[in-house]
Amino acid sequence: MKKRDDASRERARARERERKARTGFGPALSAVMHDIQGGRCAICRRRMKLVHDHCHATGKPRGLLCYGCNMRIQIVEQHGEAALAYLRRPPVVIVLDTMRHGTDGQGRQLLAEYEAAQGLKSD
């Protein structure tokens, strides 16, 4: 049994070393951040299992986040400008504007059907 416990402890230490190398978070920093953040996600403030957020470019630690916020941060980092452009002018707005202002009779018909289905007034 002692052999199994030693192997288990060694695997845990190896995981800890790998995490520190990858994220910059060692056990001490992780504990301090947990206390400072009150065990809550630094973004949404929910109390749930937290992950170690770090900058993928520099490897420097940033804080503790819930999984959902960490994934959203990753999307913003990788696709920030495209995501903002999408939010500012979603593809459906472009399509509806084209249908509304175009000269294509079929486009206007599709727009009228869409607006009727949505309970909207057609131009």
Image (cartoon, rainbow, N blue to C red):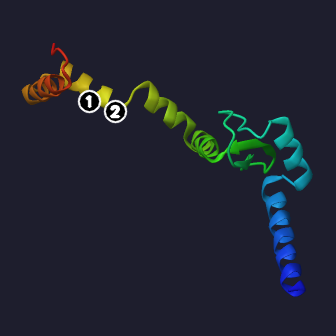
Q: Are the residues flagged by discs 2 and 1 in contact, CB closer than 8 Å?
A: yes
Q: Which residue is mark 1?
A: 95
Query: Percent from the top left, x then y, of residue 69?
Result: 62, 41
Mark 1 neighbour class, 10 Å CA radius: few under 14, some 14 to 19, many 20 or more: few
Question: Which quarter of the rendered picture does the N terminus lie within?
Answer: bottom right
Instruction: State the image coordinates of residue 75 (x, y, percent, origin top left).
Output: 57, 43
Say left or right for 45 vs 86: right
Residue 114 lies in quadrant: top left
Q: Nearer the viewer, residue 64 or 75?
A: 64
Reading the image, the residue beneath label 2 is 91
Q: Residue at x 62, y 45 (%)?
A: 74
Q: Callout 1, which amino acid?
A: Val
Element at badge 1?
A: helix
Q: Residue furthest front?
A: 1
Residue 104 shown left or right of residue 55 in the figure: left
Which quadrant: the C terminus? top left
Please name the residue shown 50% across and 36% down the image. 82
Q: Quadrant of residue 108?
A: top left
Tag 2: amino acid: Pro
List x then y, in percent, for residue 39: 77, 40
Report the disc number at residue 114: none
**Residue drawn 59% across the image and 44% down it:** 68
